[in-house]
Amino acid sequence: MEFLKRARRRPSESIAELRGVVADIIGDVRAEGDAALFRYNEKFDGAARRALRLSRAEIERALRAVSEDEIGDMKRAAKNIRDFAQAQFDEACRPLSFSPAPGVTLGHRAIPVRACCCYVPGGNYPLYSTALMLAVPAKVAGVPRVAACSPPVKGTSEIHPKTVAAMELAGVDEIYAVGGAQAIAAFSYGTAQIAPVDLIAGPGNAYVSEAKRQCYGQVGIDFVAGPSEVLIIADRTADPDVVAADILAQSEHDRLASGILVTTSRDLGESVISSVERQLSSLETAEVARASWEDFGEVIIAASMEEAADTANERAPEHLEVQTEDCEAVAEKLYNYGSLFLGAFSAEVFGDYASGTNHTLPTMGAARYAGGVWAGTFLKICTSQKLDRAAMNAMAPLVSRMAAGEGLAAHARAAGLRMEKWGL
């Protein structure tokens, strides 16, 4: 394996400072409630509002501010997301009834959490697609109370109207104009205006991710996400301009994002580097995309497609594209990724917006043990059992012996007493 371009090491010296700042914010919200949210809204976003939940009038005003064409696009994307989320739910979350022995009935149900918060980043852009990606699966899962929050547009007291429109179209029940670590704390512990939830899902900046990490346990989370990333496996048949465009699409997210090419063709690798530079010259978001590419972009030459697949599995990227002559054969070798895109026609950006798969995915290697957001993110698989009298009598001696073997006399007695009372 050879690097035509290598990423620099990600900064780590400020992690302790970040954790301290976030801990202070969480502490303030727990101690002061809404007053802390007001203060941080003003400090970070210049927002002076005091009613954090958007009124019906504000939602209607936002809907009027978005064009009919944009509303139509959101509805089309939401339908694809909803249809796929429903198909996943129907396939994977059926009730189960199973009998391992006569008279024993075991089962499970997929039970939705009672309340969730969908965190939709604001940052530099109105990332309204994330509202669809989070709230639609939550609704498919049957969550009774779906709240959502997003930071106000800087210097105003309002969430971007496109984000509000997407939240409304996705079926969000409550919308709040608050973001950052303070929002995570508020939905974890509750304030006068914000009732706490059972689970928080959604991406965010380093402060949001750290707040989710620190609040986990008080509240459930989807996962802790880092900077966005794409890894592309390609051979000599790939189009260098298309590969470069996909790298830049990822790079423009933020300065810490990474676009990685792993290829068996040196010529392709060199051509992609040249194409990235050409495309940057006319890209409106070039300032961010160039910084990301220069710092964290990589081009790796693999000796074989097997080595390319091994590299991808080791990195466990958020998005994994395969642009090769036989992408299906390569796909059989892959097992660590957030979402997989096979063939040059299957652009990662399609998954970002409208194809139907979810774009809220594990990053920074977390795809080794976690998948992306889906309806199941908002569900608990809860088991049940029922034994008849004969099954109880058959089971009790086994359980009593095992409990006694562990020295747990009350456990053994709980089984033995049933035999005494209801033995056959």
Image (cartoon, rainbow, N blue to C red):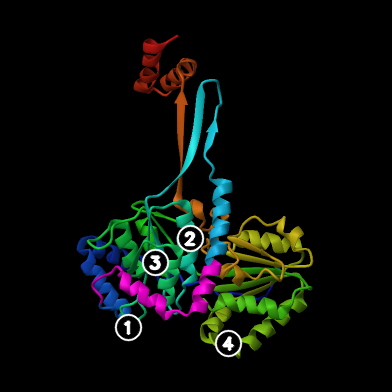
- Tag nearer the camera, 4 or 1: 1
Q: Which numbered circle lies on residue 208?
A: 3
Q: Examine the rendered structure and indicate whether residue 210 appears above or below residue 407.
A: below
Q: Of the residues under marks 3 and 1, which one precedes in the sequence?
A: 1
Residue type, numbered disc 2: Val
Q: Examine the rendered structure and indicate whether residue 208 appears above or below residue 245.
A: above
- Residue 290 placement, left or right of 131: right
Q: Which residue of the protein is positioned furthest toward the top in this rendering? A: 424
Tag 1, which secondary structure?
loop
Q: In the rendered image, which residue does mark 2 sit on?
A: 136
Q: CA distance from mark 3 to mark 1?
A: 20 Å
Q: Quadrant of residue 264?
A: bottom right
Tag 2, which secondary structure?
helix
Q: Which numbered circle lies on residue 283?
A: 4
Q: CA distance from mark 4 to mark 2?
A: 32 Å
Q: CA distance from mark 2 to mark 3?
A: 22 Å
Mark 2 is surrounded, within 10 Å at the Cα level, by few (under 14), some (14 to 19) or many (20 or more) other residues, namely: many
Q: Of the residues under marks 1 and 2, which one precedes in the sequence?
A: 2
Q: Which image quarter is the N terminus in?
A: bottom right
Specify start and end residues of the magenta stretch as a single range. 49-77
